[in-house]
Image (tube, helix red, strand yellow):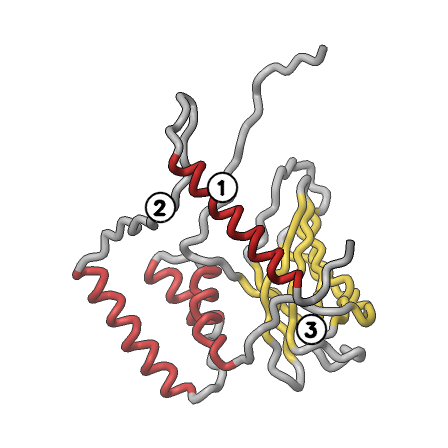
Amino acid sequence: MQLTGSILPICVNIISVRIVMKLGQELSRPLGRNETYMAWSEFKPMLNEYNEEFRSIDESLIRLLKERKSLAKGKRFFPSKEIIQEWASSYEMDIPQINWLIHSLNEGSYSVMPDEPGELLSVIPIMQKSIVDDFEYQLTHSMQHKNGSIIFLEIKLLENGEHIGHIRPQLLLEVKGSKEYQVRRNGSHGGGGQAQVRYLVTPQLPNNISEISFALKPYAIPMENPPKEIILDKEVNFE
């Protein structure tokens, strides 16, 4: 049987009414011994131990941020390595964390980065490498997407007889060219003295990268929680 356009809405309404009536009957009947009703609950406020000391610090940060933004006028300002090293020694902070802060202050000068790189258009080789402290760093290639480029970094421990279980790169790729490029991490994996890191770069790199320069800068979020390690040391038998 085929329902016409005028009859179909009536049938849908009748079914909806029957569902509501059935639900009401179920809610009104006594609960069985092992039955419970599911019900909505309210979100409970998170415990916040904020106090006047934190308020004073945060207010100073906001005031200084506003002052820096006013002076910068949309331009990017980054201190030299010597200044960062001096701050790291004076305030007992890691250089990657200081770089993260300054980089974050300069992010306002860029456009909003896309959530996804978009359609893959082409792949271009980079093949640039450098060796620092027994580690080889190699930028292998760039996958050219519609909304940006994904650059691949390979890190490898050179043979020195020492066993390394896991490498944790605290590095951000810096890209310099005729345009202003914005970079963020796009994933990583590794093990056994090797690691691969992907960086999303916007806008998209040109197919001819002869005028583009790359560098790796120390970069780490101060409040970042280290990955949790689970040790499996129980005997397992298979039947």
Badge count: 3
Per the image, the residue denoted by label 2 is 41
Q: Earlier in the sequence, mark 2 or mark 1?
A: 1
Per the image, the residue denoted by label 1 is 22
**Residue 156 located left or right of residue 23:** right
Q: Residue at x 77, y 67 (%)?
A: 143
The answer to whether marks 3 and 1 mark residues whose Cβ atoms lie closer than 8 Å is no
Is 17 placed above or below 163 here? below
Q: Residues within 10 Å of mark 3 (few under 14, many from 20)?
A: many
Is 27 placed above or below 177 here? above
- Per the image, label 1 sits on a secondary structure element best described as helix
Q: Residue at x 73, y 59 (%)?
A: 3
Per the image, the residue denoted by label 3 is 148
| CA distance separating discs 2 and 1 | 23 Å
Q: Position of residue 70 (x, y in %)?
A: 36, 87
- Per the image, label 2 sits on a secondary structure element best described as loop
Q: Residues within 10 Å of mark 2 (few under 14, many from 20)?
A: few
Residue nearest the observer in this picture, 209 or 227: 227
Give the amino acid type for the residue marked by disc 2 in the picture.
Ser
